[in-house]
Image (tube, rainbow, N blue to C red):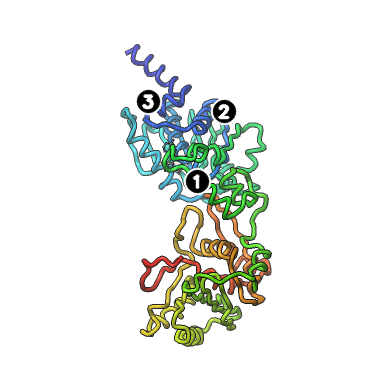
Amino acid sequence: MLADAAQVKRLQEKIRNEPEFFHREVLGYEPWDRQLEISRSIRDHRNTAVRSCNGAGKTFHIAHEGLRFLYAHGPGAVVINTAPVWTQVENQYWRYFRDAYRKAQYRLGGKLLKTQLNIDEKWFAMGLANDPDRMEAFQGWHAENIMVIFDEASGISPKIYEAALGAMAGGSVVRFVLIGNATQNSGPFYDAFKDPTFNKIRIRASDVPNVAQRRQVVPGLITHEWVEEMAVKYGVDSDIYRVRVDAEFPRHASDTLISVDAVESAINADREYYNEADDISGLDVARFGDDDSALIRRQGNHAEVIWKVNGNNTMTLAGKSAQYLRQNPQTKLFIDITGGLGAGVFDRLREQPDIADRVFGVNVAGTPRDPSTYVNIRIESWANVRDWLKDAVLEKHEDWYQLANPKYKITSTGKMQLESKEDMKKRGVSSPDVGDAIALTLSKPTEGDNLGVTWL
Ligand SMILES: Nc1ncnc2c1ncn2[C@@H]1O[C@H](COP(=O)(O)OP(=O)(O)O)[C@@H](O)[C@H]1O
Ligand SMILES: [Mg+2]
């Protein structure tokens, strides 16, 4: 009996002091060197803050570390984790956590639920929501040993930070881990990097083995091709590159996506036309009766504003659009159907058999082709416009300058999001109807025939 207790004690000490032993021998998992650095920081420091590029294995590793804390410091060990939105807690951290638990080389004991592992009443791991209205969930644990993990920490409410500090007060072994993309240049995550009580770690894309060695070393982590693409698309000086690749905080709270210069260089540019068979028109339907609806036509690298009409009358727009489609039998029409107004026009046009198969709807709030970079189709289409503009020709029209108006921000998960029309209105910038119309022609349709066809 005594020998057993001594053995358990020695094993636990090893788990506590040699994170790589636990990960390799117990979980059968091989962290890369910066992941191990995070483990050692957690071993040696009460507070750890990690700012990192995308796809470095942050969530994956921290889930394994949550498991290690339980067995390094239990019984009487509690691990609490959260992330900005619940699906991140449930489908990322806890998916990794459950996998790690199940693949362990030894029976780890306890009862595993979707977002909980219960060993006994005072010995458990649990996912909590980042919900400032339910702060009490974070308070009053008074656990003997406690670890609190904030994943995508930039996006976690300051109130939840406060509540977590309360939960950690008075514990005997306490670990606080903040990890994520450095997406906001203010707030508690930003402040942690100026706080002397935090051990700070920064992981750049160039540190990731797949990038450093230019080959796939760890499947699932970012690659050097991805880094190069980010550099070409956004430039190494852009905020998006700083945040997603260099693990640096952005310079601005938000950036405009398209520069005035890029628009100006394309207007009546002396550039050769090409790819004219790629003939798509875009109809942006005004949100409010006093805004404009706009139709533009894009043929390859060339685009022109066909008409703008005041208001959003479904019958007028459907009539004008049907006439336009009949006069231009080559073009397809992509209509923004988000929010219902454009859907009326779309339905009306789809009822007319001679043009129906050339009419497509785009729910710009829908899932983009590249969901790891963009929150929705709208920003993805606008990013496509930005790329397209580099060698495009815009038929002169004052409204093209609207393209330089919307700002984008980087969400706490490191994805890009375009400023909403409502927010633009609030800062006194006109609704970019012509911009939205050209963006539609470079977007992924979500309604209509032949959706399997690749347009771009
Ligand atoms: N050390 C590792 N060994 C094997 N696979 C890993 C390792 N680290 C990360 N991964 C894989 O990389 C993918 C991305 O990791 P994730 O933690 O979600 O990235 P991040 O949170 O940094 O965006 C995961 O699907 C995981 O399977
Ligand atoms: Mg993650």
Residue 386 left/right relative to 277: right
Give the residue type at disc 2: His
Seen from the viewer's position, the closer of residues 273 and 356 is 273
- Helix, strand or loop at mark 3: helix
Give the residue type at disc 3: Glu
Residue with the mark numbered 3: 25
Could you tell me residue 22's position as x and y percent? 41, 26
Question: Label 2: how many residues lie within 10 Å, few (<14), some (14-19) or many (20+)?
Answer: some
Question: Is residue 424 visible in this depiction of the protein?
Answer: yes
Residue at x 58%, y 81% (from the top left corner): 308
Could you tell me residue 332's position as x and y percent? 45, 77
Residue labelled 1 has its Cβ within 8 Å of some atom of ligand 2: yes
Vertical arrangement, residue 125 with respect to residue 20, above or below: below
Q: Nearer the viewer, mark 1 or mark 3?
A: 3
Residue with the mark numbered 2: 45
Do the numbered discs 1 and 3 sit on residues whose CB atoms are within 8 Å?
A: no
- Helix, strand or loop at mark 1: loop
Give the Cα distance between marks 1 and 2. 22 Å
Quadrant including the N terminus: top left
- Helix, strand or loop at mark 2: loop
User: Reading the chain from its start, which is encountered first: label 1 or label 3?
Assistant: 3
Residue with the mark numbered 1: 83
